[in-house]
């Protein structure tokens, strides 16, 4: 029974984070994870060591040597986020700085936790701003209340919009410039989706090679938009292609490809693909207009999955980010190869820490923590 509670609890968190379309889809996913030897799995570390939310006092500085700090992408938002910062003066000060730029107080909206806030959390424009500001406000709280948590952060990276938080943390760009860019970025991406209905499918199970071969044969216009883990990828396409692909991978080609789960992501469009070219044309000039400095913390970039120090190259890669696939798995491996053994995610919900711990075999024995925004 303990095993069942662990597994179902874990899957429910994943379902909440990524938005399963039906209870049946969630039930099927859970069933696929259960095997015939459940009685031998209860003590298996892959289940025992699932990342759990971490209080500020739980992380021992001595256990944090060579740490990758991770910031999430769109989809990690949830109602009630930012509540943990209601007594933090430094976090509230950052919310106030953002308000001067965007015209509204993110913290106050999140604290309302009503239907209006829930609707806003489905808006690409609002979500990108709230994730950027909320995660960085949490960093300010950590600096004030428990700076040792960040003492051994040697590397930083973020997924999609999270990359902008990473850039601010590494002092490559200013907080104010990041907020301005993200507000424009979110609006441009949302407008692009309104003009051309696109979306993304999350596929868990097939290898990258198997998935690419299948797409080339059956869906030549669809491309991988995020390389998340060993056997987890997102694929961008038109709304019709997305619906068709989910259906095919859930029925006809499920066993053939070894699909464990395929579903449409609740993000609004086909991000990190050619579908965002028009949005990129709006955002890129803004990125090019702001000052970039050399990182003070080792920075791992989305487009290459590699370390970059040259401010000019960082700016160029950031301009490519909207239309190029995210190399998240490679980013994690780059950190690991540089000696990182501890991964800390600062996010409203567990996403990247679960992927690192359970979906990338090379780093599965590393320590993973979630600090809740």
Image: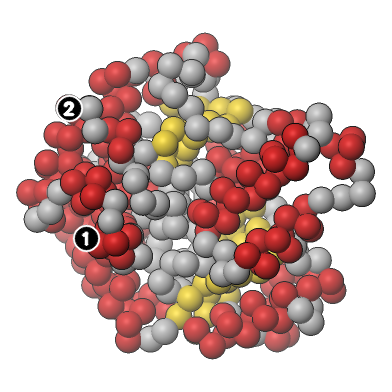
Q: Is residue 76 above or below residue 224?
A: above
Left or right? Give the position of 47 relative to 81: right
Q: Residue at x 34, y 18 (%)?
A: 147
Q: Which residue is mark 1?
A: 183
Q: Residue at x 41, y 21 (%)?
A: 56
Q: How is the image coloured?
A: secondary structure
Label 2: state its secondary structure. helix
The location of residue 58, given as percent across then percent down, is: 48, 18
The reply to whether residue 139 is visible in this rendering is yes
Q: CA distance from mark 1 to mark 2?
A: 24 Å
The location of residue 302, given as percent across then percent down, is: 46, 53
Which of the numbered marks, if any, corresponds to residue 89? 2
Quadrant that contains the C terminus: top left
The local crowd at label 2, few if under 14, some if 14 to 19, many if 20 or more residues have their Cα within 10 Å, is some
The location of residue 85, given as percent across then percent down, is: 27, 33
Q: Is residue 194 above or below residue 162?
A: below
Q: Residue at x 44, y 67 (%)?
A: 267
Pointer 1 or 2: first along the chain = 2
């Amino acid at each position: 029974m303990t095993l069942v509670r662990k597994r179902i609890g874990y899957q429910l968190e994943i379902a909440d984070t990524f938005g399963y379309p039906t209870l049946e889809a969630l039930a099927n996913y859970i069933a696929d994870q259960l095997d015939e030897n459940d009685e031998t799995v209860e003590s298996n570390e892959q289940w025992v060591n699932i990342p759990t939310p971490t209080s500020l006092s739980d992380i021992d500085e001595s256990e944090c040597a060579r740490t990758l700090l991770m910031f999430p992408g769109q989809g990690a938002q949830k109602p009630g986020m930012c509540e943990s910062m209601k007594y933090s003066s430094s976090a509230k000060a950052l919310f106030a700085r953002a308000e001067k730029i965007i015209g509204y107080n993110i913290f106050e909206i999140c604290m309302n936790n009503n239907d209006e806030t829930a609707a806003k959390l489905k808006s690409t424009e609002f979500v990108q701003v709230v994730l950027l500001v909320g995660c960085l406000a949490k960093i300010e709280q950590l600096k004030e209340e428990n700076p040792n948590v960040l003492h051994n952060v040697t590397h930083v990276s973020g997924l999609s919009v999270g990359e902008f938080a990473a850039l601010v943390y590494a002092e490559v760009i200013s907080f104010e410039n990041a907020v301005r860019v993200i507000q424009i970025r979110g609006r441009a991406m949302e407008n692009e989706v309104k003009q051309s209905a696109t979306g993304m499918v999350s596929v868990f199970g097939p290898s990258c090679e198997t998935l690419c071969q299948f797409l080339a044969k059956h869906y030549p216009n669809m491309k991988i938009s995020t390389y998340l883990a060993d056997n987890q990828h997102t694929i961008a396409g038109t709304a019709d292609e997305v619906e068709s692909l989910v259906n095919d991978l859930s029925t006809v080609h499920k066993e053939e490809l070894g699909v464990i789960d395929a579903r449409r992501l609740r993000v609004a469009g086909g991000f990190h693909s050619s579908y965002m070219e028009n949005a990129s044309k709006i955002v890129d000039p803004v990125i090019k207009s702001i000052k970039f400095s050399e990182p003070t913390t080792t920075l791992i970039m989305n487009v290459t999955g590699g370390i970059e120090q040259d401010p000019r190259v960082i700016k160029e890669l950031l301009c490519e980010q909207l239309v190029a696939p995210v190399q998240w798995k490679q980013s994690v491996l780059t950190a690991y190869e540089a000696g990182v053994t501890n991964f800390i995610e600062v996010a409203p919900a567990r996403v990247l820490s679960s992927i690192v711990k359970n979906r990338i075999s090379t780093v599965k024995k590393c320590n993973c923590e979630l600090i809740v925004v």
